[in-house]
Image (cartoon, rainbow, N blue to C red):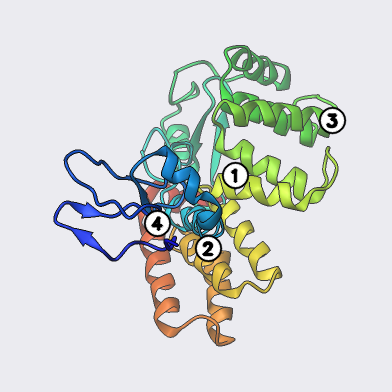
């Protein structure tokens, strides 16, 4: 009976079919198992015949490959995290260091907002629309973007319902509905909001596993807070090595709490000295990339 591990026997033209042992040639084209890539087959019939024997190893390797993607993807922050005026990544936490311009749904960093005020510029720095005068105007601008299916506007409207902003009554169920729509349209912050809602049972039945799944989806697209939440969940499960890998990624993206956690893991003997040094260097590099004279001034006077 043939083994379902990768074949060691090779001909001049390639490896052998895991089921029948036939070697690859100009006339016999071997194809990888699409789920795990551990073995090759000469055709569909051999793949079906070998399925029962290969199934366990295939599932295990497929799960490993899927898990690896959590650490391979999401090392770069998404476009929404960059100020469109100075083009620099916005310091973390984003909501404390930038402001949504509801006319165009662009996040403008506090440094650029300060520079604009010093020049007495009152219109939107991005689209030049006059600034809204009151909450009713702000809500109308958001809703106008929602009609156009702007995912960030839909996500922002969900946040407005969540917090009762712009004269809206708090409505978490409505917020979740909007976040689901925004996520389907590509909003990464909406995925994080859905993670929070499901993990804590806000507006929906509490479902920790589903919340973690949303966090993972956002993290794999560069959402730093979601990456940190995934790491914390792994740490709660005592999956220290998996948690550390996530904390390292977040720290190197400029997440201060993740750097602090790596330090505690180092003191506790879980992280190595080299890993802690890697986290510090990565954090410092990310922090430097987020700095500007205007941002430093805005922080001093805030």
- What is the quadrant of residue 27 in the picture? top left
Q: Secondary structure at mark 3?
A: loop
Residue 35 in the image: state x and y as whole percent.
47, 47
Q: Which mark is residue 171?
A: 3
- Of discs 4 and 2, which sits in the foreground? 4
Upstream in sequence: badge 1 or badge 4: 4
- Residue wearing tag 1: 95
Q: Secondary structure at mark 4?
A: loop
Numbered label attached to residue 47: none
Label 2 and label 3: CA atoms lie apart by 33 Å
Q: Nearer the viewer, mark 4 or mark 3?
A: 4
Q: Residue at 48% across / 23% down in the picture? A: 124
Helix, strand or loop at mark 1 = helix
Residue marked by disc 2: 246
Q: CA distance from mark 1 to mark 3?
A: 21 Å
Residue designated by label 4: 38
* Picture coordinates of residue 298, whole percent (x, y): 49, 48
> Which is nearer the N-term, disc 1 or disc 2?
1
């Amino acid at each position: 009976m043939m083994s379902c591990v990768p074949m060691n026997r090779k001909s001049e033209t390639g490896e052998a079919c895991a089921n029948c042992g036939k070697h690859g040639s100009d006339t016999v084209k071997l194809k990888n198992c699409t789920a795990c890539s551990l073995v090759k087959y000469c055709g569909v019939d051999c793949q079906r015949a070998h399925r029962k024997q290969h199934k366990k190893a295939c599932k295990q390797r497929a799960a490993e490959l899927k898990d690896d993607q959590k650490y391979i993807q999401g090392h770069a922050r998404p476009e929404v995290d960059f100020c469109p005026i100075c083009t620099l990544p916005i310091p973390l936490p984003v909501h404390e260091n930038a402001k949504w311009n509801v006319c165009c749904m662009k996040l403008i960093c506090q440094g650029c907002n300060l520079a604009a005020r010093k020049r007495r510029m009152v219109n939107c720095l991005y689209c030049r629309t006059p600034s809204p005068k009151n909450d009713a105007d702000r809500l109308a601008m958001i809703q106008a973007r929602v009609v156009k299916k702007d995912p960030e506007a839909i996500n922002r409207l969900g946040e407005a319902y969540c917090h009762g902003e712009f004269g809206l009554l708090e409505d978490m169920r409505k917020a979740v509905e909007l976040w689901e729509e925004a996520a389907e349209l590509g909003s990464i912050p909406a995925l994080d909001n859905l993670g929070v809602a499901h993990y804590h049972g806000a507006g929906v039945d509490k479902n920790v596993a589903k919340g973690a799944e949303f966090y993972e989806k956002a993290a794999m697209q560069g959402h730093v807070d979601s990456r940190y939440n995934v790491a914390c969940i792994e740490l709660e499960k005592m999956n220290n090595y998996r948690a550390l890998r996530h904390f390292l990624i977040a720290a190197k993206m400029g997440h201060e709490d993740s750097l602090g956690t790596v330090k505690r893991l180092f003191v506790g003997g879980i992280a190595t000295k080299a890993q802690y040094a890697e986290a510090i260097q990565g954090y410092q590099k990310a922090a430097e990339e987020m700095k500007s004279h205007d941002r430093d001034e805005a922080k001093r006077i805030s």
